[in-house]
Every structure is written in structure tokens, then in C-alpha cells.
Image: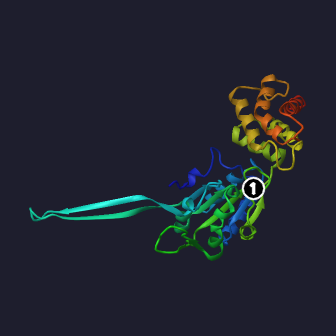
Amino acid sequence: MTVLKEKATKNTKGLVQDEETKDLLSRSLQYLKAGYPVHFTGPTGAGKTSLALALAKKRKKPVMLIHGNHELNNKDLIGDFTGYSSQKVVDNYIRTVYKKEETVTEAWRDGRLLEAVKHGYTLIYDEFTRSKPTTNNIFLSILEENILPLYGSKMTEPFVKVHPDFSVIFTSNPAEYAGVFKTQDALLDRLITMHVGYKGVDRESTIIAEKTDMDENQAKAITTLVAKLREKCQEDTGPSLRASIMIANLAAEQDIPVDGKDPDFQRLCVDILGHQVSRCLDDEQSLSDAEDMILKACKSLKVAE
């Protein structure tokens, strides 16, 4: 079972924290201390998981991470019997008399949720809406009665009490995203939900500059390009901050100038952004339309001196 320690809860340079991010983390930490679960929701690439990891680190407790998916079930969360173990004892104290004893027991392994609940870990349930609502129902008892029911486990106790240090942080994508289930109102009513959106050109350029050591003017040119393309997409869709970081990293590694008229830079932007932009356009528009938009945006790109 993998438990994330403190130094495993950040990437190479950690979460870039401007004043708005620091304020969000500070408020969220107070909510957790008061016993309320926190839920970060917003478009992909907006930094929800990074926020959740940074928040969990502030609690200074071991961190358990669960990724939501449609196959997740109670056995994954609570645990399961993994097989049998046997022990044989042969007593031949008297040479001609043998005494045999054999004990067979079932081997049990705690699931991630049970382990976190028992030991007071901070649980991050990442993209929890990708799991079926019936699976997530188990959190209702945890958040309301402070118990974890041991459904179908054949354990002698019907439930486990939640450790007083246990906290849970949820993240999710909007309901219109593919592969996402509608969350039951009973669960959402028990969460403090905060929207995490895209950060705007200036904040995103600061993040890129700090993460990639790129000149801030070049970083701003990249985020401006991506933001213009995002405007052509439906709300909360389109290329994200991740795409901007990929462009910055690859341009630096391959010694490609951040120049909208440079063919290598244009090709890099089309490769990274083409599919992302095409997915958020009208059905009548194609990948070639998306590539034309990207090239047009590149050619109008200006890098401040």
C-alpha cells in the first residue's frame, strides 16, 4: 500500500503560490481543521490536484491518494481477503506417536480508505466523480456518522470508527466532461466546494517562468497564445496550463525560439494544441480548422523585449 510522504506531495518546484492561491489554501486548511471536507472542482489542467497535494502537505500527516474510476468498488476502498494461510504443527515427542495440528486462516488486506480512516491520514480522492455514485455512497456514513461500514467484509465488527485526525480532500471535473458521473446531492451537501478555474495570462506566465526558468516575457507570449485559443472554445474547455508548460519545456529543450513566425515553433504549437483545440470546437469544424487557428494565432504572437 502506497502512502505519500511529505516530500512526495509536490512536483520538482512545487506549487507556485501567488496571493490568491495562498488565500485559497489558507481558507481550505481552516475548513479541514474544523472537520469539513474540501472539494476542488474545475476544468482539467487548472491545478486542482496540485492544490489538493499542497493542502494535504500543510496538515503534516501521511497522505493517501485514491484515483476515481468506474471500476472502483468497496473491496478497493475497504479491503478484501487475499487468500488463505495455513500453519502445521507436528509433535513427535514420543517417537512412535505423532500429533498433527493444522490451522487455516484467511489473509486480509486493508483497502486505502480503511487504512486512511483507521490511522488518521489525509485522503485525497482525485477525480472522484469518475467513480460510480453507488461506490461513493460509502462516504456518506464517514462524513455524517464518523464511521466506515465494513460492507461484505465478513469482519467481526460491522464498522470502524473514523480516526479524529482523518480528513478528506475531493477533486472533480465539471459534469459535462466525458467519463464523469453525476454526484448525488446528499454527498455534495456535505462538502465545501470551491471552483478552481484557469488563472489568466499574467498568473499563468508567472507559473511557467518559475517552473521552467523561462524568461517571463517569453512565458507570457506562450500563455497569451494559449488563452486566445481557449477563448474560441466552450466555457471551461480548451488547452490548459499544462499545454503552456509543455510548449515552454520543449521549446527550451529543443532550442526552439519563442517566435510565432518560426516554423519549428509553429509545428510545436500545432502538435501540442491541435487535438485539444479541435475537441472544443463546433462539430462542423475539423482538425485542419484547429490547426489554421493555431497558425494564425502564432503569426500574430509578439514577445516583449
In the drawing, does residue 24 fall left or right of residue 4?
A: right
Q: Around disc 1, counting alpha carbons within 10 Å, would you say few (fewer than 14), some (14 to 19), or many (20 or more)? A: some
In the drawing, does residue 290 fall left or right of residue 26?
A: right
Q: Residue at x 73, y 54 (%)?
A: 180
> Where does residue 96 sit, x and y in percent of width and height?
9, 62
Q: For the residue marked with disc 1, what is the amino acid? A: Thr
Which element type, helix, strand or loop, lies under badge 1? helix
> Where does residue 111 sit, x and y in percent of width and height?
53, 60
Please tell me which residue lies in front, 273 or 217: 273
Q: Is residue 88 above or below residue 149?
A: above
> Where does residue 66 sit, x and y in percent of width and height?
60, 56
Q: Residue furthest top?
A: 263
Please tell me which residue lies in front, 277 or 89: 89
Q: Residue at x 86, y 50 (%)?
A: 235
Question: What is the quadrant of residue 172 in the picture?
Answer: bottom right
Q: Is residue 176 above or below residue 28?
A: above
Q: Residue at x 48, y 69 (%)?
A: 154
Q: Residue furthest bottom?
A: 145
Question: What is the quadrant of residue 86 in the picture?
Answer: bottom left
Q: Name the residue carrying label 1.
A: 21
The C terminus lies in which quarter of the figure?
A: top right
Q: How many marks?
A: 1
Can see residue 224?
yes
> Where does residue 168 sit, x and y in percent of width and height?
64, 64
Q: Residue at x 71, y 42 (%)?
A: 210
